[in-house]
Amino acid sequence: MSRDSDILIVGGGLSGPILALALAQSGHNVTVIDALSEEIRKDAAFDGRSYAVALTSQRLLAGIGVWDAVAKHSQPILEIKVSDGRAGEGPSPFFMHFDHAEIEEGPMGHMVQDRHLRRALLDAMAASDGVTHLAGETVTAQQATPGGITVTLASGKTLSGAVLVGADGRGSGTATRAGIKRTGWGYGQTALVCAIAHEKPHHGIAHQFFMPPGPLAILPLPGNVSSIVWSERAETAAAFHALPEDEYLTMLRPRFGDFLGEISLTGKRFTYPLSLSLAARLVADRTALIGDAAHGVHPIAGQGLNAGMRDIAALAEVITDATRRGEDPGSIAVLTRYEEWRRFDNTALALATDSFNRLFSNDNALVRGIRDLGMGVVGKLPTLRRAFIREAAGLTGDLPRLMRGVPL
C-alpha cells in the first residue's frame, strides 16, 4: 500500500521525538503527531519537571545529535546518598553512599530540566529531513490492515504507515484503540515538585531521604539550585500545596534539613499524583507502545524516563534491523521481538519501585530496623555498591546499540 510515512508516532512529549530522531538517522521517514501546539512545547517556563538522565540515556541523546544542545544546561550526578528517617529528626546512621569514581565510565548521569530537553528535541526535529512534526493534531481513530496502518486525525486528515507507535502517556489512546488493557493502582501519594535555591553548593550530590509518608528527593541542578520531588500522602500534599510560599517552606525545612544552608523557592510549585500503570502488552497489530504509554512507575528511583529510553533504543534497533533484512517492520513477528526484549525489564522495574515504596513508606519499627541494616550492609560492601552504581548509570542488562554508544 502507498504510505505517507514509514513510522507514525502519536505523542510529542519526549519519547516520541527521541524515537523519531533515532529512526530518521537510520533512514526512515517518520511523522510525529503532537496534541500540543509548538508554541506550548517551546514555552521556556520551568514546569517543575527535571530528569535524572542515566549515562546510557545520555549516550542515546548523543547518538541522535541532541546532547550537545542539552549539556550546557545539565548538572552531572557525581554521588548519590540514600538515607532513612523522620521529618525533623535527621537521617538514620545507616545509609548508602554511591560515588561515580567507583566506576570507570564517568558520572552516573546528568540532571536535565524538561524545558531544555524539550526545546533541543523540537530544534532537532525541525532540522531533520526525515521527521515531520504535526503539532496541534490528535488521533481519533486507527485501523490496522495486513498492508499497513491508517490513523484519522481530528482535523479529518488521514495518514498511513507501516508501524504506529504510541508515545502518548499513561492514558494512551493508541493503546486503548488497539485493545491493549492496563493494570495498576494509585499509591495515595502526591509528589510536590519545585526548584529550591540554597546557600551552599550541592557538589553534584543527589539525595534520597525516605520518610514514612513517602520519599524526598533532592536532585542537583546547575548552580546552587536543586529540584525537589517530595512525596506525601495525597491529603497532606494538597494541604501543603495550598499554603503560601513562606508556610510551604516552613513545612519543607524540617524534611530538607540545613546541610545546604538557607533555602528559598525559585519558580512555581507543582503537584503530580503517583500511581503504577502497566500495559498488558507492548505490541498489537502494527502497533507498539513506548515510555509512559507502556509503563508508568513511582519516581522513587528516578528511572521512569530511562526505562522509556531503553524502549526507544530497543524499538529503533528492532525496526531498523528488520528493514535492512527486507522484513516488514510492522509485522507482529518483528514487533514481538521488541516486546520480548523489553517486557521483563519493564515489569521488573514496576515491581521493584512498587516494593521499595511499600517498604520505605511506612513507620513499622521492625521494618525500619531491617531496612536500615540492609542499607548499612550495602554501603559497606564494595561489590554491592558498584552493582548499585552501575544500575543507576543504566549499565546493566541487554543494552541496545544506541545505549552502548554504537550507531544504528
Image: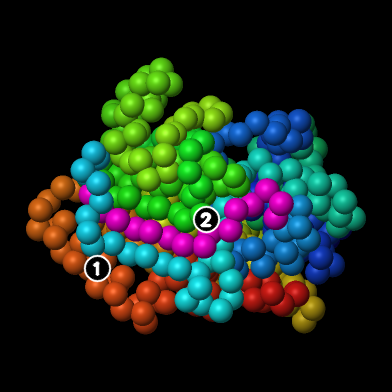
How crowded is the residue under tag 1: few (<14 C-alpha within 10 Å), some, or many (20+)? some
Nearest to the observer: residue 3 or residue 91: 91
- Per the image, the residue denoted by label 1 is 376
Whether the residues at callouts 2 and 1 have beta carbons within 8 Å, the answer is no
The stretch of residues the image draws in magenta is 71-85
In the rendered image, residue 342, in percent from the top left (x then y), is placed at 52, 69
Please state which amino acid type lies under the numbered disc 1.
Gly
93 with respect to 385 (left or right): left
- Per the image, the residue denoted by label 2 is 204
Residue 378 figure quarter: bottom left
The question of residue 76 being in magenta is answered with: yes
Q: Residue at x 45, y 68 (%)?
A: 99
Which numbered tag is attached to residue 56? none
Residue 166 visible in image? no
Residue sitting farthest toward the left: 366
92 with respect to 82 (left or right): left
Residue sitting farthest toward the right: 129
Q: Quadrant of the N terminus?
A: bottom right
